[in-house]
Amino acid sequence: MPRTLVPRLEIKSLTKIYDNTKVVDAVSLSVLPGQITCLLGPSGCGKSTTLRMIAGVEPQSSGEVWVDGQMISGHGFSEPPEKRYIGLIFQDFALFPHMTVWQNVAFGITKTSDDIKEKANELLSKVGLTSKCDKFPHELSGGEQQRVALVRALAPRPRIMLMDEPFSGLDKRLRDDIRDETIDILKSEATAVLLVTHEPEEAMKMADEIALMRDGGIVQKGAPYNLYNAPVDREAVAFFSDANIIKSTVNGALANSQFGQFFAPGLSEGASVEIVIRPQHVRIDFDRDGKGPLPTVSMGIPARGCVERARFLGNESLIEFKMDFDNSIFKVTIPSVFLPKLGQPLWLTIPRDRCFVFAA
């Protein structure tokens, strides 16, 4: 029989209650060695509290934390944070201002080790900072400080790395470079990583698995591709991108709209539904003396709208339409320069394989 991999980190029904309010509600997940899992969600959904409970700096109200098949916290028992072999990286870096770069890194190295400075410099070489070993934190750039914080957290060779919004204080170009560098180092060490962020783009770029959190619980979990292309509800769609919403009701397993009919399997007759389509999936066609393209099975019925606003965003154009049928605003993005005139009538169609129908 094939051997089942033991998760490096596993949490079971982890719960935190403040003043009779569940801020973390029975969260369960597992992370394998070398895997990067992301807790993604809006501010206040319980992501950082979950991280603190795993690290042992915040006691849980109930639930269990397991590392390599052994329970380290639960049912009244809790290993102290320093014995959990868990690394922590936060947004503010938390470097010691009175220590040099190598001394900051050495702080995480076992004090019985010989040649501590040599070991610190070996770690600094992984991020190209050996030349800055005698500098103080205030003499470094933000990106350099982030690199020092990373190797300091790696110095004790933790089995698990917890990262709380670690790149949010960096500008975008630098953030991309540091993020890629961090992924390479963590995977080379086979470290299990649990990352917290509120930015979908960062989660998609870093994570092997995403756990989408809302109101203290996990609402959907899976590979980034699956969460993006098979969202569990309207809020899950909207968290990853803008979304256009069309309201309808179910009639014979179909939802009727000005764009034609949409399949609504599994929803009861007469139920209110929302048809959700991302702006980049809407198709635009030109107006021909008040007529649009012919209806098709794959694209449905075209609906006309007039340009309310058009903006070029660098890698795409965003056009907002006021729809003829109800004056609602419909957003469309085009991966090129397309800036129609204000008030210009155009026809929109919705590909049936790129939309979602959810109960309202």
Image: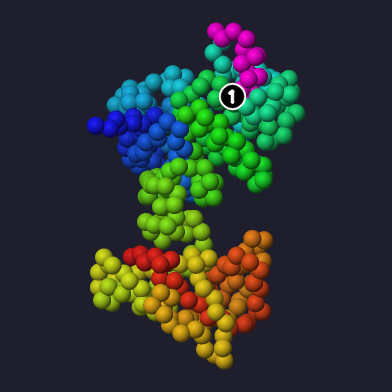
What x and y, as percent, mark residue 124? Answer: 65, 24
| Quarter holding residue 79 | top left
Instruction: Identify the image quadrant of the C terminus.
Output: bottom left
Residue 327 can be seen, yes or no: no
Residue 181 can be seen, yes or no: yes
Foreground of the two, 341 or 126: 126
> Is residue 113 found inside the magenta-colored segment of the image?
yes
Foreground of the two, 125 or 52: 125
Classify mark 1: helix, strand or loop.
helix
Q: Residue at x 45, y 32 (%)?
A: 34
The number of callouts visible is 1
Q: Residue at x 43, y 26 (%)?
A: 56
Q: Is residue 354 rendered to the left or right of residue 1?
A: right
What x and y, as percent, mark residue 304? Answer: 51, 82
What x and y, as percent, mark residue 20? Answer: 35, 41
Q: Residue at x 55, y 8 (%)?
A: 112
Farthest bottom residue in view: 289
Q: Residue at x 49, y 55 (%)?
A: 240
| Quarter holding residue 356 | bottom left
**Dominant SS type (magenta):** helix
> Is 344 located above or below residue 12 in the figure?
below
Q: Amino acid at mark 1?
A: Arg
> Is 172 located above or below residue 348 in the figure?
above
> Is residue 119 found inside the magenta-colored segment of the image?
yes
The residue singled out by tag 1 in the image is 152
Please tell me how crowded label 1 is: few (under 14), some (14-19), or many (20+) other residues with Cα within 10 Å.
Answer: many
Q: Which residues are magenta?
A: 112-124
> Is 26 located above or below residue 344 in the figure?
above
> Is 207 located above or below residue 287 in the figure?
above
Q: Coloring scheme of the render?
A: rainbow
Foreground of the two, 231 or 291: 291
